[in-house]
Amino acid sequence: MNGPEKIVGKKIFLYILVLLVLVVISRIISAEKIFYDANTIGVALATKSFSLEDTRPHLPGYYLHVQTIKLIDTVIDDLHSTMMFVTIFYFSAGVILSFLIFARYMELKNAFLTMLLVIFNPLVWYQTVTPEVYAFDLFFASLAFLIGNRGKSIYFLPLLFAIATGFRQTSGILLLPLYIYYWYKFYKSDSWQLKYFIASHLIAAIVFLLWFIPFTNSAGGILEYFNLYKTNSPLPRISLQQHLFQFSSYLFYILVPLMILFIIFFVNQSRKRTVHLHVRNDYPFVQLMLWFVFPFLVFTFFTYHKGYFLLIIIPLYFLAGILLNQSAVNKLTVSIVIFLEIIFFVFYPCQSVSLESMYTPNKRKSNIVKVWIDRTFNSYLMAKLRIEKQEENLEYLFKAVRSESSIPGNNNIFLDPTINLYARAMQYKFPGKNFVTMDQLNKNHFVLYNGLDITVKDGFD
């Protein structure tokens, strides 16, 4: 191996081809078949009528993501299929770029196995078989890393951030420490030229404004856009303690495969009565830390939702690649962990979360450990059977609504608060009906879903 500047041989294309085949097959056979999640439905409805005020989509807006879906759907002509195609495309591109990162610093076999750990991680798998936007983060972050390490190509980095923030506004902000580092490092090199630095940022600013102006104008202007965060903030109205409790469930799915590898490493080392890992000096630890630490702190103490980890999973799983590359764990061990990831995602059963776990702490009788287990392995379960369970529940509700629809003039349907998460899916399926449910975080508010709109009311006449 010749270090990070090694010439990648023809074998890398075979590895990439195998990875793409595995990604496409695994995602297609386990993909969500009907809309369930309120946020993804909001994105779908945004292609029909973009309105941030009515959470089509939810803030911060995903303007270019919506426009991309809208464009591709002119060919596919099925919004759910289009959004699944876009998700798998984002993820496939991200996998290729992430593998190239691993391949710069590892033997190809080790890079391949490390990439499989990421592909089949239950959280990653789940968030890339539902029509979410999070797969874009993997693509964007990996491309930023590669451009930042490719000499004068860094002049394209501002343009990348200008475009990427149109897809995922928060991701560009979270990677700013890494962005600044790349420019600082390039500034100290002999290739730095001020005129190109200024020109690249001017071009990026123009491109940024080309989408940002119509985007904010859709909300009535830039001030009106930021004022929406007072009423339509995507941040959950929960305490830090509640947030950490929820965040720990997602963290579980990301960390367990790594923990298994590190436990095996320490057990093996303890038998030798020493714990020492000879780490090469060409691993990009500074870049990996800047990529990982700031977003992780935000996720931990501020906000985390569903698939945010795709933004920072590569620097985290780089640690597994180091263990492999330094022969601290063997390939068989990693292969077994990958196999266990697959078994868990495909076969772990999903049960309905108990009502006890949905109660506030002062009302429930179960201890906090039981509630955490119930939520982690039911509410937040990262497995294929959870998707199937949700689709089964939706089909049952669809059947019930069709039955009610046989009664003339019966257009108002009240959804029990325990199934309020299905409200937007019902709205999308039956745009001619009025669905009413209760806001679980504010019991004094009722939410009316009608056509494309959502209205919050204090009560109904």
Image (cartoon, rainbow, N blue to C red):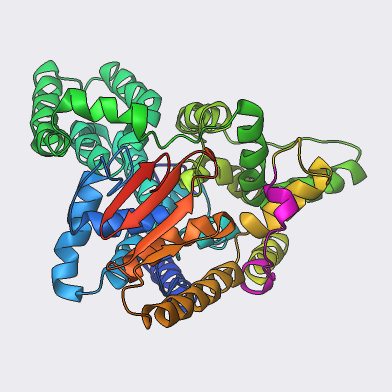
Identify the residue shown where x is 10% and y is 33%: 213
Residue at the spot 45% in from the left edge and 32% down from the top edge: 291
Q: Nearer the viewer, residue 212 or 176?
A: 212
Please give left or right for residue 329 compared with residue 311 in the image. Answer: right
- The structure residue drawn at horizontal position 17% and vertical position 26%, both measured from the top left corner, is 222
Q: Quadrant of residue 239?
A: top right
Left or right of 167, for residue 24: right
Tell me where residue 176 appears, x and y as whole percent. Answer: 35, 26
> Which is more toward the observer, 52 or 91?
52
Does 375 appear in magenta? Answer: no
Where on the picture, by quarter, is residue 62? top left
Does 357 lie within the magenta span? yes
Residue 339 place in picture, x, y as percent:
67, 69
- Considering depth in this image, is 351 or 405 the residue closer to the camera? 405
Residue at 42 percent across and 43 percent down: it is: 459
Q: In the rendered view, tell whether residue 76 sits above or below residue 248.
A: below
As drawn, 42 above or below 20: above
Q: Quadrant of residue 457?
A: top left
- Number of on-image labels: 0
x and y percentages locating residue 99 in the rendered image: 44, 55
Can residue 108 be seen? no
The answer to whether residue 211 is visible is yes
Residue 19 x, y percent position in the rendering: 44, 68
431 on left or right of 128: left
Q: Which residues are magenta?
A: 344-359
